[in-house]
Amino acid sequence: MLFSKMAAEGGGKEMNEIKTQFTTREGLYKLLSHSEYSRPNRVPFNSQGSNPVRVSFVNVNDQSGNGDRLCFNVGRELYFYIYKGVRKAADLSKPIDKRIYKGTQPTCHDFNHLTATSESVSLLVGFSAGQVQLIDPIKKETSKLFNEERLIDKSRVTCVKWVPGSESLFLVAHSSGNMYLYNVEHNCGTTAPHYQLLKQGESFAVHTCKSKSTRNPLLKWTVGEGALNEFGFSPDGKFLACVSQDGFLRVFNFDSVELHGTMKSYFGGLLCACWSPDGKYIVTGGEDDLVTVWSFVDCRVIARGHGHKSWVSVVAFDPYTTSVEENDPMEFSGSDEDFQDLLHFGRDRANSTQSRLSKRNSTESRPVSVTYRFGSVGQDTQLCLWDLTEDILFPHQPLSRARTHTNVMTATSPPTGSGGANPGSNGNSITTPGNSVPPPLPRSNSLPHSAVSNSGSKSSVMDGAIASGVSKFATLSLHDRKEKHHEKDHKRNHSMGHISSKSSDKLNLVTKTKTDPAKTLGTPLCPRMEDVPLLEPLICKKIAHERLTVLIFLEDCIVTACQEGFICTWARPGKVKAFHPVEAEGAAFAESFSAKMYLGEGSHHRIASSLSAAVSQVWKSVSHLCEIFHSCIKIKIKGNTGPSFSG
């Protein structure tokens, strides 16, 4: 009896243990304690009644090579730091900027990656009372405050993002279920805005602002019922995915304001969503404790994943990791680091990736299989990693050489839609031969932005429409993309008074869902559990004491954050920058050992992990002894050398 009680206590202790490392097929991921960011006093934040901790990244292209910047909110505080990642220890005593707000709390934020420089960055911050602030944490300036008097919306800001490719347009979602399009160059007005219907569809309506002069908000979206929890743009910036408390994922064509497709959660609200790097799939998470994979092309659920024991708060694709498998082994002539670079999804161009391989092997002659990697974190304090493989994506097709090669080609380029050529990052067609890999995604706290080299090359329809008032929206010619950026200036002051409206001016005019949400189970909107493949997590580890609110995949690490206000850095395999050569050698040996011993999430894997941990501990002990030895030598030398004089 006593023995069984001790065993139960021991098992419970093991289950509740916070993990500091985990192993996948790539090797060992390791928590870097010296790279932890938090409030300067490092005291855990009392998270009762506070808004979720969020993290945003931006790169300012600093010539020193350390251009990454980090912003995070904890309670009423907002911090802006230099992010040193796996390279150096975090210095919490020197934040670039710190702000403490009274009467309201920051809820979300987003950097403008187009305008970021080492001297200035544009940061949008949403608040619990509905306001949106534009600040520059480098210059320590507050540029503008939108919805200051709360005349536009009084509810909490749930998500704020810059429109991809634009230096001035941004989108804001509220817990009221409304979403607003703003322009930083326009004012909000001193009275409550009046709206007129622009477009209406199933469970959504879009209104323009009735005014003789252009003012904010430019557009108002009413989407579904209940809070609009998160939205995100597709990698090419053309589509918008929204998840709401009513449990629906809705995907819109952003320019034409048309509904592309929908999906319903198994039950409860949807809290988060993320696009795949190629824009072909969307993963959602929410109150059903599941992750759901939805096909953008087929507009249907293709898989669900069960691994969490509570609500899923964040889902994110890993654009730097993919699996390349072939029937015949490919001869590899590069280093271990080059092999890891080969696994980076969307980081290197296809030609440079193939150049690392032996020239007598090519994707033309050997079948290649691609695996999507995504992760999720939840209120159960667990991190799960998932692999979406071809047997799930194409269950009824044989694994043929031609089809597999085609999948690799298309899996690395955005969907073409109705056009023939694949759109490039600047809106022009791409004719580059070979499988084009999407450009690297900016470091963001949410869904990926479109990678655009400059604002002029994008020339979004939204930019053109806003430049000429809202007359573009009135004619609904939203697909017309202007390529001349300078045409914006002379059209900026057009009147909106000529917009006709045959509908009423009700603010919340939304067509009710034709299908009863309670009756969607078993339909294509919400298939039953047995009707779609069920994914099992590659790993599922408890990594925090409080609920997790952040998951961001960077090139050399994974960043997570919990509600206590601790932002953690997990070094990818081979990316650990140890402070002592012996420790570095030990870490490399442990990672190599773990990768070779990795056999999956069974008993063999637990044995391998235990052995790996033991090896790491031995190397740490050796490193510590070496440090003591070096210290003794330094003391002895210092005692024998006499005083130092300067001439």
Image: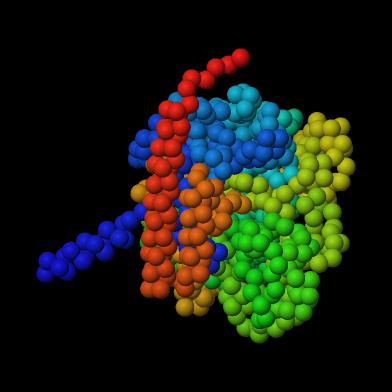
Q: How many numbered marks appear?
A: 0
Answer whether residue 298 is visible to the viewer in this image: yes
Q: Is residue 67 shown above or below 278?
A: above
Q: Nearer the viewer, residue 537 or 49?
A: 537
Provide residue 512's location: percent of width, then percent of height: 56, 57
Residue 266 location in percent, x, y? Answer: 46, 66
Q: Where the C terminus falls, by quadrant?
A: top right
Q: Tell me if 120 is positioned left or right of 290 in this view.
A: right
Q: Residue at x 48, y 50 (%)?
A: 583
Nearest to the observer: residue 519 or residue 506: 519
The residue sitting at 70% across, 38% down in the picture is 61
* Residue 382 visible here: no
Decide: is 367 above or below 306: below
**From this viewpoint, which residue is outermost toward the top?**
647
* Left or right: 465, with 265 as reference point: right
Which image quadrant: the N terminus? bottom left
Q: Position of residue 290 (x, y in %)?
A: 46, 64
Percent of width and height locating residue 37: 47, 39
Tell me what residue is drawn at x 56 percent, y 40 percent. Answer: 84
The residue most toward the left is 1
335 above or below 469? below
Residue 171 vertical placement versus 574 (above, below): above
Q: What colour scheme does the image use?
A: rainbow
Task: Name which quarter of the figure residue 322 lies in.
Answer: bottom right
